[in-house]
Every structure is written in structure tokens, then in C-alpha cells.
Image (cartoon, coloured by chain):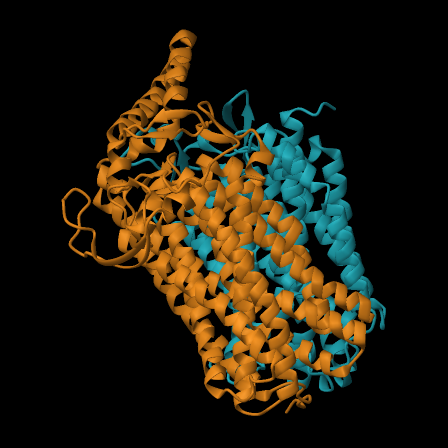
């Protein structure tokens, strides 16, 4: 293995995929937000759920922001093409996170103008819209988008923009695609499963426990159906392949990607197995509280491998449907070698960051949340 | 072209709106973090419950403010992609890195330890809790460092070279980007301005308690700590402000000319202490730029050149050129005129086109020659997009008045903190109710001062997103004006609602006072 440009491009696609994968796991916060009504029902219980999620929401939010920043730094052409083109899709995602950011802090504070119900509605909107649309956006890595890129445009003083979007809906068209919706809702129901598993892990309350298990059951059934349908679509779909600068369509591209990269295939299967094991063990053994870890880490593996399938093996990770040669690959959209090297040095900090996150998580979650604790503290949402 | 201008204006308006809202919440976060950190350190060392009550009170206000800072912050990062996509490609190779580093180094630190700071009182040891409070503060400060490194780079683009094959600028020297003098000045200037705002906030709110004769001891203790932080902050602000002015004079002379309303520069240039601009003044007429002014001779020359007799160019000097100056590489040259720069910019853009054509034909001789022309003229690449030299002048009234409001209030805050420290020490503060009212009314002045500073920095550099390399018109995304108008209004409404809610919650929490008891869920 030589540390050439291609190595750094692959390394950064791996890191972006890993961040994306961790983000999907941390969407348990969003999933949990959609369960406040079904599992919470009365205010004291809802308060426990909100405070359970409220100590983690920033982590999810931060991961999203870092995912964006890292994508910008490592593959700026994606940043400029997709964000500037699929304007409404990304704006909708951003709005759903803006309203989330204040909701925990404001919901139960007196004089909050909008009232608790509004902030709880914000949490619900963020849970549903955020999860579904992030899934839709990720799905476009496989299903593609309508854009073209001409760097020569920079020479035209009157119209210098290099990336143009070829669909007037500016991103909303992605929501109208059935495969994208399949993945969007698969992510939503997965996040609900994860949310319920997190409540089981973090809250000591018999009613919450029972309702969360029920939630795991029916949400995971829907999730598995949607997920299998998406995988079936993906493995039968045609994709682009780049060879020496030209872009060609190849039938069963993603199936071949799986077969030609056995490590990724293994990781994918192990990931799916982990997701299912966490769910099944929680459903069969009463009192088991650690399903979140099996399903969560399984989610990280599964999503990581899915994203690697999108970008490795001479595959454009952002195919253009209107101008195939404009499709973005990890080599034509990346930052310069020097920038990737600098960023790679910075990335050596990531294990330390992970270490202190895990350490504080263990400190803060050592004791489960109880109704008693929430009732007797001023430090709550 | 009209559509393009309108799109640029709306995109700028949206960025200004979101950035100014963000800059309402961030400085308070930066300042309160330090003050709360000091308070908790005292609690840690003395073990006295009163210090825990004081710490937790200000921490609660910190949390309310922090939430809106987060809500307004996410949009700033993604907006570079959504609304400034050409910019994101053209300089993303350099600009993206600080943003990613900010995330990896700062945001996770903030997010992780913030949760411990708010909810960890009974879950972790006292020492770990204190460490978490300081790490939250450190995270916020590091975050400011990297975003200001990114901003400073736009004002003074160093450490990069243009790659004609990828058609973008690429980083060649990370240290030059991260440690540029503009970046360091900007960082210390902005962060210490945050300390000042945090201090004014704490002094003002505490003064309200003194006026109401509630929590007198807690309020006085808070005032003492905040005043020291505020005094240290404002002195550092003044020092780095001087450094910033010097950097602006060297690197963005047009901004300096606008800050002081100078159309024709002089040796021994006066510094305008107070002035009213002539609203009829155009840059190419002979009217007096001022209706009224009080100036101190030589001071501006000294600030800008470190020589009381140095030459400071005015707007027309910069447009016409012909005075001795230094170029980007630091060599002494005679300043070119705006027209010459525009010609050079057009030559650079044309050479880029020639280079691309030559490469397509595999004509390496022609490519090399075009590349040489491009390199020779690249310093003024952005001028190739400028159609009329008048576009090179930022809004003089906006920059001039913002600058003077900022420095006047800055001077006021130096006196303010000294006075409060003396009065507090002499135990006179409680008795002088009019001083307490001044303290309370100084809170909005702090916000006005900081917003003015932001306007000077950002409006003053117009029309450039990247100084001399890329103007705003060439930085945008190709979307409909109506789309940007829609999101502008959505942001305006949502951020205003959030601001109103925040202020309302803050006021209520302040009225509840220190150390309230838990309220049971209904």
C-alpha cells in the first residue's frame, strides 16, 4: 500500500462514511423524539424520556455538523454541487434541526412564548423529517441526481457558477423517488427501534420498559421489510462505473461491488446480524437492557459498508442522471493531496475524541434515570 | 446580469442575517463560559455553597443562550454550500479544512462536556465537573479560533496557489493559513470582545438584583468577578483592535478608507474622533466628505503605518493608484490603478481560458505560456469580474458609522469597568442607584458594540468574498432569486421568534433568582 493521492481519497471516503454511519446510529435521539407520545403518554414519563434524550441530542447534532464540515474539507465539489443544487432538500433538513436545537432547553421553561406543546411538536417534526430526509439524501448516493458541472463557466463573467442543477425542484424531486423513500423510511423506523432500545438502556421505569419493548417489536418489523426492499432494489440496480475518465453504465453494479470487495461484504453482513441480534435478544429475554449496543454498533457497520459500496471500486458516489460525465467520484471531487494530508494528521485526534465521549457517556449513564431523580432536580429539561 | 445582482444581494442578505443573529449569542457564550468557569473554580477551592448557587444561576442562563447559538450556527456552515457553491469549490480546498478541524477539535468537546456541566452535578466528582466546565469553555473558544481562521483567510488569502487544472485554489502552507497575523488578531479581538459582553451582561443583571435589593451578596460577588474579566477583556480588545487596524491598513486599504471616510489620503492623516458624513458625497465629485468632524492629526497615520507622518491612501487614491505601497508578496511597488487591476484580472481569466483550450489540444507550449500569463496576473484575478470601479467601494456610511460606534463604546467600556471596580471596592455600588441603572442599560450597548464590529469587518471588505481573488457575484449558487428570498424570510421569522422566546425565558429565569427549588411535574 502506498500513501499516494488515491490512498488519502479512500481514507477520507472511509472517514466520511464512518461519520455518516455514526450519525445514523445517533439518530436514536430523533427516533426517540417520535416516540414521546406513544411511550411517554403522561407528563412525568414524557419528562423522563425527554431528559434521557436531552443529555445526548447535542452529540447527534454535532455529528451532523462535523459530517458536513468534513465532507466540505475532503470533497468540496460535492459540497458545492449538492448543497447548492438540492437546495430545498438540504434546507428542509437544516430547518428541522434548527427547531430541535432550542426545543429541549426551552420546552419546560416558564414564559417560553410558544408553549411546551409547540416545542414537543418541533421535536416530533425533527424526528420524522430529519430522519426521513437524511435517508433520502443518502439514497441519492446510489440513485443519483440531476446536475451538471462545467468548470469552464468560471470564465464567463456574467454567469460564473460551475455547478448547475437540472431539475427545477432543486432537491425536492429526490423525495418523489420510491427507492429514496424506502431508504428514508427505513432510516426513520430504524431510528425508532434505536430510540426505544436506548430508553430500555437508560431509564429505570417498568412502564417505559414495557412500552419500549412493544415499540421495538412493531417498529423493527416495519424497518426490516423496508430495509430488505431497499437492499433488493440496490443489488439489482444498475450503476455507473468509471474507467480511465469515462463513465459507463454497468448492470448490477452494487451487487458486483459487494462481490468484488469481500471485506465490505463481510462487514455489511456482520452489521445486519448485529442489528437483528440486538432486536431479537431484547424481544426474547425479559430484563435484557443492552440491545442498543448490538443494534447500534451493527447500524454503524451496516451504514459504513453501504457508503463504502457507494464510493469505492471505481463507483461515482454521486451519479449525475443528466450528465453522466459530471458524476462525482472520490477522485474527481476531492481536495488536493496536501489538504487531505493535513486533514489526515488532524484525524489522528479522532480516537481521543471518541475516548472522552465514551468515558463521559459511561460516567453520565452509570445510573439509570428514574422518576424520582427527575422530580427532585432543578437540572432538567 | 440584473437577476444575478439580485441573487447576490439576497444571498448576502441571508448570510448577513444568519451571521448577525449567530453573533448575538456566541459572544455571550464565550464570555459567560469564562466567568462561570472562574466562579466554579472558587466553589471548588472554597467548598462554599454560595458559590455553587452563583455558578448554577449563571450556568442556567448560559444554557438558554447556548441553545440558540447552536440553532443559528448550523445554518452558517451549510450555507457556504447551499448559497455560495462557487465559492465552496473555488477555495474549498483551503476553507473547508478549518471548518472540519473546528468540528473535530471543538464541537465534540463542547457537546460532550456541556452535558456533564448541566446534568453531572450529582453524577461525577467535583473535580471532573469543574474540568467539564472549563473544557466546555475551551471547546467554545477553539471553535471561535477555527472559524475566525477561516474568516481571516478570506480577508487575507495566504498559503495557497491556483491550480488551473482543477480550476480552484489549493492549500500549500497550512501554518500560513492557521497562524496568519490577521487570523490571530481576529481571534483574540473577537474572543475577548465576547468576554466583555459576558461581563457587561453579568454586571447588568446583577445590578438589577441590587436595584431590587435581592440576593445582594450574590450579586456583588458576581459583579466583582465579571468586572475583572470585563476589564481584562476590554484592554485586550483595545490592544488587538489596534493590531487589527494595522493589518487592515496593510491588507485591505479600501476598508480602512471607508472606516475613516477618507477620499483623498494624506501624510500625517488625521483620525476622526467624531464626524457626520455628507450624505450627498459621491466618490468622483469634489464635495467635502464631512458635514462636521473633529479629528486628531497624525493619529491615523500612526495607527496604520506606525509613523505619524506615514501616507494613508483614500478611496480615490486606491482607485487611481500611483502611490508607493507593498504588494501581496511584500515587495515595494507603486500602487496600480483600479483600471489596471481590472485589466490584469481580465487577462488572468482569459489566460485561464487559453490554458484550458491549449490543454484540450495537447498544446503544451501554448499551455505553458498561458499559465505564465495567468500566474503573472493572478494577484488581481477577482478584478476580472468587476465591471465598474465604483463596485470596488464598500458602503462608506455603514462602515464609517459602525466603526465609530464600536470604538466609542469600546472606550466607554474601559471607563465603565474601572469605575465599577472602584465603586464596588469602596462599597458604594449599592447606594448609587443611577450607576446601577447605567449598568443595566449597558447590556444593549455591549450588543450594539459587537454587532458594529462585525459590520466593519464584513461590509468593509465588500465586494470581496476572497480579498482581490473572488467577488461576491462570482461566489454564488445557481438558484432562483425567489428561493433565496423564501429562505431569507423563513430564517428571519424563525430566528426572531427564537430570539423573543429566549429573551422572555431569560428574563423569567433571572426574576426567579439564585438557588430556586425544584418544581414538581404536574
Chain B as rendered: colour? orange
Residue A370, image x and y in percent? 77, 80
- How many numbered markers are drawn? 0
B508 or B225: nearer the viewer: B225
Which image quarter holds the C terminus of chain A?
Answer: bottom right
B77 or A290: nearer the viewer: B77
Residue drawn at point x = 47 percent, y = 50 percent: B242
Q: Which chain is cyan?
A: A
Residue B215, image x and y in percent? 63, 88
In the rendered image, is residue B30 in sight? Answer: no
Residue drawn at point x = 55 percent, y = 36 percent: A238
> Position of A179 compared to B292: left or right?
right
Which image quarter holds the N terminus of chain A?
Answer: top right
- Which corner quadrant of the image does residue B138 belong to? bottom right
A64 or B296: nearer the viewer: B296
A292 or A272: nearer the viewer: A292
In the rendered image, is residue B329 in sight? Answer: yes
**Up-down: is A320 above or below A54?**
above
Residue B409, image x and y in percent? 42, 65
> Position of B490 compared to B94: left or right?
left
Residue B192, image x and y in percent? 55, 59
- Which corner quadrant of the image does residue B283 belong to? top left
Amino acid at each position: 500500500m502506498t500513501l499516494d493521492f488515491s490512498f488519502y481519497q479512500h481514507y477520507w471516503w472511509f472517514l466520511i462514511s464512518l461519520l455518516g454511519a455514526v450519525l445514523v446510529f445517533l439518530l436514536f435521539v430523533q427516533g426517540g423524539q417520535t416516540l414521546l407520545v406513544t411511550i411517554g403518554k403522561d407528563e412525568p414519563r414524557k419528562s423522563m424520556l425527554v431528559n434521557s434524550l436531552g443529555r445526548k441530542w447535542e452529540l447527534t447534532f454535532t455529528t451532523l455538523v462535523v459530517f458536513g464540515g468534513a465532507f466540505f474539507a475532503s470533497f468540496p465539489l460535492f459540497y458545492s454541487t449538492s448543497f447548492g443544487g438540492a437546495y430545498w432538500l438540504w434546507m428542509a433538513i437544516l430547518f428541522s434541526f434548527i427547531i430541535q436545537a432550542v426545543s429541549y432547553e426551552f420546552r419546560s421553561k416558564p414564559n417560553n412564548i410558544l408553549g411546551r406543546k409547540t416545542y414537543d411538536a418541533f421535536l416530533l417534526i425533527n424526528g420524522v423529517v430529519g430522519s426521513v430526509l437524511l435517508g433520502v439524501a443518502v439514497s441519492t448516493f446510489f440513485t443519483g441526481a440531476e446536475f451538471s458541472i462545467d468548470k469552464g463557466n468560471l470564465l464567463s463573467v456574467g454567469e460564473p457558477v460551475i455547478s448547475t442543477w437540472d431539475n427545477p425542484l432543486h432537491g425536492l424531486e429526490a423525495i418523489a423517488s420510491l427507492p429514496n423513500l424506502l431508504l428514508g423510511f427505513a432510516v426513520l423506523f430504524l431510528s425508532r427501534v434505536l430510540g426505544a432500545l436506548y430508553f430500555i438502556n437508560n431509564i429505570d421505569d417498568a412502564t417505559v420498559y414495557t412500552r419500549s419493548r412493544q415499540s421495538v417489536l412493531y417498529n423493527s418489523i416495519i424497518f426490516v421489510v423496508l430495509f430488505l426492499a431497499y437492499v433488493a432494489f440496490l443489488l439489482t440496480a444498475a450503476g455507473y462505473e468509471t474507467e480511465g475518465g469515462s463513465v459507463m453504465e454497468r448492470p448490477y453494479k452494487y451487487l458486483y461491488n459487494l462481490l468484488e470487495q469481500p471485506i465490505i461484504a463481510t462487514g455489511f453482513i456482520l452489521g445486519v446480524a448485529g442489528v437483528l441480534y440486538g432486536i431479537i435478544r431484547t424481544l426474547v429475554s425479559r430484563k435484557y437492557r443492552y440491545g442498543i449496543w448490538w443494534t447500534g454498533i451493527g447500524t454503524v457497520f451496516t451504514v459504513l459498508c453501504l457508503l463504502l459500496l457507494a464510493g469505492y471500486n471505481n463507483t461515482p458516489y454521486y451519479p449525475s442522471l443528466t450528465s453522466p460525465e459530471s458524476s462525482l467520484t472520490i477522485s474527481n471531487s476531492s481536495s488536493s493531496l496536501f489538504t487531505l494530508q493535513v486533514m489526515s494528521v488532524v484525524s489522528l485526534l479522532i480516537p481521543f475524541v471518541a475516548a472522552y465521549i465514551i468515558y463521559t457517556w459511561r460516567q453520565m449513564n452509570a445510573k439509570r434515570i428514574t422518576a424520582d431523580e427527575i422530580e427532585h432536580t432543578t437540572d432538567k429539561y | 446580469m440584473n437577476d444575478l445582482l439580485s441573487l447576490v444581494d439576497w444571498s448576502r442578505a441571508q448570510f448577513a442575517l444568519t451571521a448577525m443573529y449567530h453573533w448575538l449569542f456566541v459572544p455571550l457564550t464565550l464570555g459567560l463560559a469564562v466567568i462561570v468557569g472562574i466562579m466554579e473554580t472558587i466553589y471548588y477551592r472554597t467548598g462554599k455553597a454560595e458559590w455553587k448557587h452563583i455558578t448554577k444561576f449563571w450556568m442556567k442562563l448560559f444554557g438558554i443562550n447556548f441553545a440558540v447559538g447552536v440553532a443559528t450556527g448550523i445554518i452558517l456552515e451549510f450555507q457556504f454550500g447551499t448559497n455560495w457553491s462557487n465559492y465552496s469549490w473555488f477555495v474549498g480546498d483551503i476553507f473547508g479544512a478549518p471548518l472540519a478541524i473546528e468540528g473535530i477539535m471543538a464541537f465534540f468537546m463542547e457537546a460532550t462536556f456541556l452535558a456533564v456541566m448541566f446534568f453531572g452535578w450529582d453524577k461525577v466528582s467535583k473535580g471532573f465537573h469543574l474540568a467539564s466546565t472549563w473544557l466546555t469553555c475551551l471547546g467554545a473558544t477553539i471553535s471561535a479560533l477555527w472559524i475566525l481562521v477561516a474568516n481571516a483567510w478570506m480577508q487575507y488569502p495566504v498559503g495557497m496557489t491556483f491550480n488551473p487544472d482543477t480550476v480552484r485554489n489549493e492549500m500549500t502552507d497550512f501554518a500560513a493559513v492557521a497562524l496568519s497575523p490577521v487570523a490571530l488578531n481576529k481571534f483574540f479581538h473577537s474572543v475577548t470582545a465576547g468576554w466583555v459582553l459576558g461581563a457587561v451582561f453579568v454586571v447588568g443583571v446583577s445590578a438589577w438584583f441590587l436595584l431590587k435589593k435581592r440576593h445582594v451578596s450574590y450579586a456583588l460577588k458576581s459583579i466583582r468577578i465579571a468586572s475583572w474579566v470585563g476589564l481584562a477583556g476590554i484592554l485586550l480588545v483595545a490592544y488587538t483592535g489596534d493590531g487589527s487596524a494595522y493589518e487592515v491598513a496593510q491588507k485591505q486599504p479600501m476598508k480602512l478608507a471607508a472606516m475613516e471616510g477618507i477620499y483623498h489620503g494624506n501624510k500625517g492623516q488625521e483620525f476622526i474622533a467624531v464626524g457626520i458624513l455628507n450624505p450627498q458625497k459621491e466618490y468622483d465629485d469634489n464635495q467635502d466628505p464631512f458635514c462636521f468632524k473633529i479629528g486628531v492629526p497624525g493619529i491615523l497615520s500612526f495607527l496604520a503605518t506606525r509613523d505619524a507622518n506615514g501616507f494613508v491612501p483614500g478611496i480615490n487614491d486606491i482607485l487611481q493608484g500611483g502611490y508607493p505601497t507593498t504588494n501581496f508578496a511584500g515587495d515595494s511597488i507603486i500602487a496600480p490603478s483600479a483600471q489596471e487591476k481590472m485589466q490584469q484580472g481580465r487577462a488572468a481569466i482569459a489566460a485561464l481560458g487559453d490554458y484550458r483550450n491549449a490543454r484540450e489540444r495537447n498544446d503544451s507550449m501554448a499551455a505553458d505560456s498561458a499559465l505564465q500569463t495567468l500566474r503573472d496576473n493572478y494577484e488581481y484575478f477577482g478584478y476580472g469580474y468587476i465591471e465598474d470601479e465604483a463596485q470596488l467601494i464598500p458602503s462608506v456610511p455603514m462602515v464609517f458609522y459602525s466603526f465609530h460606534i464600536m470604538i466609542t463604546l469600546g472606550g466607554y467600556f474601559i471607563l465603565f469597568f474601572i469605575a465599577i471596580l472602584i465603586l464596588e471596592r469602596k462599597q458604594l455600588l449599592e447606594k448609587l442607584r443611577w450607576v446601577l441603572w447605567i449598568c443595566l442599560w449597558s447590556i444593549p450597548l455591549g450588543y450594539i458594540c459587537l454587532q458594529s464590529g462585525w459590520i466593519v469587518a464584513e461590509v468593509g471588505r465588500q465586494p470581496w468574498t476572497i480579498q482581490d481573488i473572488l467577488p461576491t457575484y462570482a461566489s454564488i449558487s445557481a438558484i432562483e432569486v425567489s428561493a433565496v428570498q423564501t429562505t431569507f424570510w423563513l430564517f428571519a421569522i424563525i430566528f426572531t421568534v427564537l430570539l423573543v422566546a429566549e429573551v422572555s425565558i431569560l428574563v423569567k429565569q433571572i426574576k426567579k433568582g439564585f438557588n430556586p427549588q425544584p418544581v414538581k411535574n404536574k
